[in-house]
Amino acid sequence: MKTIQLRLFQFDELTEQGKAKAIANNADYNVSYNWWEMTYEDARNIGLKITGFDLDRAHYCNAEFINDAIYTARQTHLQHGEQTDTYRIATDFQESRDLIVTTWPKDETGEFEQADELDEALDNCEDRFLKSLAHAYLRILDAEYDFLTSDEAIAEALTANEYWFTANGKMATHLEKLALTA
């Protein structure tokens, strides 16, 4: 039989060097699950489906309208604050679309002339809106990832979960559980 004794520390009890090591060892702690789900849900709430994204080299966010652009713009105005990029993008879209419709030439009966060109102009306006929203959500996802991988957020998570560490910052929670069951 062999008895081993270890001194374990909670995150706040570690030295600055131990804390730095614990943070470095757990750099992906807050992003080792589907951390983007809340952002996807926010997009769904305004009628936008995010179909994929990449924060690395490709740096993109693909999205599509669940209903249509007009619905998404209205929902954005209802659910996002006036100070958000998405709100401003929705406002710009509505103003651009309204300008196209109100200035498009009409014949003597009040019908739009060159209806095919009008449809194309409106489609282009909606495409620009979709691309702008996708880019805004890319920035949102990027900021969320940056926050979740920040030293502050990792330290907060390690503290909140009451993990135990060796003096040099190695996680030892599993050792503590092992000792309690032995």
Image: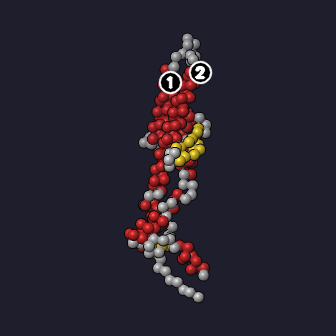
Q: Residue at x 56, y 73 (%)?
A: 174
Q: 72 above or below 41?
A: above
Look at the image and tell me whether residue 48 can be seen: no
The local secondary structure at tag 2 comes to: helix
Q: 173 above or below 32?
A: below
Q: Residue at x 57, y 76 (%)?
A: 177
Q: Residue at x 39, y 72 (%)?
A: 15
Amino acid at dot 1 = Ile
Q: Residue at x 53, y 47 (%)?
A: 54
Decide which of 12, 74 is in the foreground and name it.
Answer: 12
Residues at marks 1 and 2 touching, judged by CB atoms closer than 8 Å: no
> Is disc 2 surrounded by few (<14), some (14 to 19) or many (20+) residues within 10 Å?
few
The local secondary structure at tag 1 comes to: helix
Amino acid at dot 2 = Asp
Q: Residue furthest front?
A: 57
Residue 83 on image: x %, y %: 42, 42
Q: 173 above or below 157?
A: below
Q: Quadrant of the N terminus?
A: bottom right
Mark 1 or mark 2: whose residue is earlier in sequence:
1
Mark number for residue 116?
Answer: 2
Residue 30 on image: x %, y %: 51, 59
Judging by the rendered image, the residue that carries numbered circle 1 is: 100
Alpha carbon separation for disc pair 1 and 2: 13 Å
